[in-house]
Amino acid sequence: MFKHLREDIDSVFKRDPAARSTWEVLTCYPGLHAVWFHRLAHWLWKAGLKLVGRFVSNISRWLTGIEIHPGAVVGRRVFIDHGMGVVVGETAEIGDDCTIYQGVTLGGTSLYRGEKRHPTLGKRVVVSAGAKVLGGFTIGDDAKVGSNAVVLKEVPAGATVVGVPGRLVHQEEGAPKTSEFAAYGVVKGQEDPYLKTIQSLVEHAQELEQAVSALTEKTRRLELKLAEQSQEGTKSELRAIK
């Protein structure tokens, strides 16, 4: 038990540079308190004391602002940073060394009891602020979910998901390894390919607009030249008649 507590405290120091002392972590980190409350609530739930487990979970929600259903499975060294507004559903599973930020929902889209309704997070997954992961699928090891993303389907290991609905962003060559911790799921050197595509389309549209303007100007000059030639031809004909 004390080994797990030590691991939890160390995980805070590794993933939050704002942590200054063990006493500060013990007293001022509601995400840590929520995980400890959940371990008690989950033990009661598994022991068949479901009402008591829900009651302990409710007390934790009231004290920390983090709601974790006692039926959810939470691994070791899970760090909930800031944490206000986090909701974790009954059949959710969170792997070891995962990091979850404020406003995250691990929710279910099914109303049928007894089935897997909530997501499973692999190891070292980072779910950024405001993200919604909805459904009974798996987020692979070392995956990252961007802030405010809405993920509705499985995510492969090591991938990054952004946007609404969530779309995959593959790691660029030469970027840091995805196994390294990235606060809020932000990896340096990684760009959204959809954004790059849109940017290239905008640049192409600007080039086309310039080409059309050039053609329009050339056409205008040609029309003026033809008009002048026509006028000269008419004058020549008049002189010949005279």
Image (cartoon, rainbow, N blue to C red):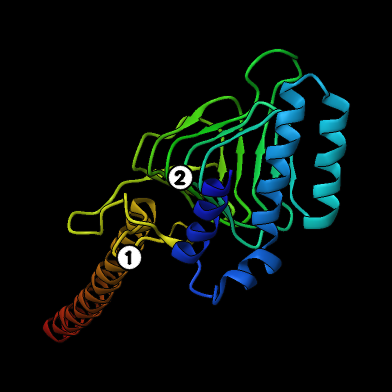
- From the top left corner, tell me how far across and down residue 185 is, in percent: 45, 56
- Name the residue carrying label 1: 188
For badge 1, the amino acid type reads Lys
Rendered residue at 20%/74% (across/down)? 222
Can residue 69 be seen?
Answer: no
Observer-nearest of 167 and 237: 167
**Position of 73 relative to 14 (above/below):** above
- From the top left corner, tell me how far across and down residue 240 is, in percent: 11, 82
| Quadrant of the rendering where the N terminus is positioned | top right
| Quadrant of the rendering where the C terminus is positioned | bottom left
In the drawing, does residue 183 fall left or right of residue 232?
right
Helix, strand or loop at label 1? It is: loop
Estimate how packed mark 1 is, as few (under 14), some (14 to 19) or many (20 or more) residues with alpha carbons within 10 Å: few
Helix, strand or loop at label 2? It is: loop
* Disc on res. 125: 2
Residue mark closest to the camera, 1 vs 2: 2
In the drawing, does residue 78 fall left or right of residue 217?
right
Can residue 133 be seen?
Answer: yes
**Position of 203 relative to 49 (above/below):** below
